[in-house]
Amino acid sequence: MSERKSATKFTEQSNKALYDTLNWEDTTDFELASRGHIASLDEPIIRNLEGRPVWDLTPYTFLDEKVAAPTVNPSLWRQAQLNMFHGLFKVTDRIYQVRGHDLSVMSIIEGDSGFIVIDPLISAETAKASMDLVYKHIGQKPIVVVIYTHSHIDHWGGVKGIISEEDVKTGKVQVIASEGFMEAAISENVLAGNAMSRRTVYHVGTVIPKDAQGQVDTGLGKGGSTGSVTLIEPTIIIGNTPTEMTLDGIEIIFQYTPETEAPTEMNFYFPQFKALCMAENCTHNLHNLYTLRGAEVRNTKSWVYHINEAIELFADKTDVIFASHHWPTWGQEACLDLLKKQRDMYRYLHDETLRLINHGYTMLEIAEMIELPGDLAQAWYNRGYYGSVNHNAKAVYQRYLGWFDGNPANLHALPPEDASKNYVAFMGGADAVLAKAHESYDRGEYRWVAQVVNHVVFADPNNQAARKLQADALEQLGYQAESGSWRNFYLVGAQELRQGILDLPAPHSGSPDVVKAMGLDLFFDFLAVRLNGPKAAGKTIIINADFTEINEQYVLTMENGVLNYSINKQDENADATIALTRTALNEIVLGEAALPDKLASGEVKISGDQSKLNELLSLLDTFEFWFNIVTP
């Protein structure tokens, strides 16, 4: 199969054209990203206890070149350079950040006796390395408070790298999060977790080389660390605006912002320092209203409302804004400009999409029609490095009208494989399609080539000429993309068409702390998702589950091809009863122990007809991680 290609003349022309549309003389972001730098790691590599790198910036030295490579959108190249600033930075009096140690940013507030830490990154290793840098250059003080701004993993996964569960239990450290945090943090990637994790490979570009023809950035940061994901449950919950607290001598006013960038999130203001933390609600890019890895569509209307509320509450007394990604903004006028233009960007996408919906335009039509107006589009922090105008307009459409465009021809369309075979036959066969597609490719019509040749690939995934041509088209689209996630999707797709799916270990969607924190309701909901309905049809099985040490009982009833459960009940007519501890369940789920071993040790006891439990377990699907995406 063919190797990676250079940029074609059409891609070079497309990327060069961008130089005429944006203010490249504005270097303010580079000044802001470097402002307040105190120190960096001698080598930008963070390792785990076994010595394996879990974070490494060294492959990105190619970004030292001032001029963008022809294979990278120059606007994305600029963002990728800005995301290379790493180390410990001073934001303002007693407020610091460690940036460039993970996808997210960790902020540190110096209290009267210790540190308040905001968002301890993804991995325990990167969080620890970040705090070690703080201790070395700011001073050795205990951490007294940890704040999770929201429920996404890059804002809490490293917590056990900086504090212990014992310190929280004894009250030495308080952990603060917004209402609904635990449910959102645990559930978001469980029920559809396998598919989301597989698509994240595309979203972040984890399997493609880090170079000018591969992964350069995600727009939000370089990518995610690959260390130990941990979690400690919050001790203080914020559910109202304003909620005022004084923590270790630091006054904080919390703004609860549900249904914004995350299902539960919060901004907060520090009156002593005139500093506003906007969590991930305002960052230096157009964010996702729908994330390409897969997630529920976000509530644009709520997002806009809460940015506006932040303006009304804090803007007239804010001298610096910092967030959970990227670099701060200093100066009251600049801070207000950021807040207003980010608010209006999301408002424009929401309102324009609905205006065009009400004129009868469809999702695909609207996505091609909308462009941000001048001042909004020209602001560097509104560029589509992570989200994009195109797919965010589709997200607004989806939230209000769903997948159906109203055209009955699309109500029950054929699935891709069947439709593709018909398309190819109608177009005169694969050879005829490819001949015409090559002509389109030579004209630089890469979107069309990717679309039409996809039919040949889905009609015959072994057609190597089709796979090669589609890969070439996707590659050029990746080279032209301003969005880091679009680029990564295109380039991972091209690589898989050329090389197939790489034989790599499958990542685990749940760390031990996440599994332990998962409520039993969610656990049994996930069990129900795994039940193979057609195989289970016509069968009835009733199982009692008794979790002895926490005194919780469930009845699982499988009938009509589904699995339901009842809480705080036991059925005297159950086929079997399984008695176990929650700890034993966790160990079995995490693969640390097998059910027969637990039965032998007496930690799990089964009464009644064990064959019925075995039959139920045999009806549960195991999800393969490396499923096909660019081929059927």
Image (tube, rainbow, N blue to C red):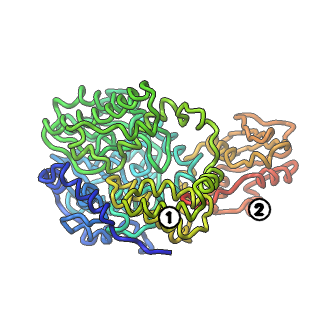
At x 41%, y 74%, the residue is: 51
Report whether 266 appears left or right of 597: left
At x 73%, y 43%, the residue is: 546
Image quarter for residue 379?
Answer: top left
Image quarter of the C terminus: bottom right
Q: Which residue is mark 1?
A: 435
Counting residues from the start of the chain, the first of labels 1 and 2 encountered is: 1
Report whether 479 appears left or right of 334: right
Residues tagged 1 and 2 counted as in contact (Cβ below 8 A):
no
Above or below, 454 relative to 364: below
At x 74%, y 44%, the residue is: 545
Label 2: element kind: helix
List x then y, in percent, for residue 397.
Answer: 45, 34
Image quarter for residue 301?
Answer: top left
List x then y, in percent, for residue 99.
Answer: 27, 56
Task: Give the residue type that dot 2 points to.
Answer: Pro
At x 77%, y 48%, the residue is: 578
On residue 113, the disc is none
Label 1: few (<14), some (14–19) or many (≥20) C-alpha neighbours in 10 Å: few
Task: Give the residue type that dot 1 points to.
Answer: Ala
Above or below, 324 relative to 124: above
**Residue 140: in sight, yes or no?**
no
On residue 596, the disc is 2
In this view, the residue in front, 22 or 320, is 22
In this view, the residue in front, 483 or 282, is 483
Label 1: element kind: helix
Label 2: few (<14), some (14–19) or many (≥20) C-alpha neighbours in 10 Å: few
In this view, the residue in front, 435 or 199, is 435
Q: What's the CA distance linking mark 1 and mark 2?
A: 59 Å
In this view, the residue in front, 496 or 623, is 496
List x then y, in percent, for residue 44.
Answer: 29, 68
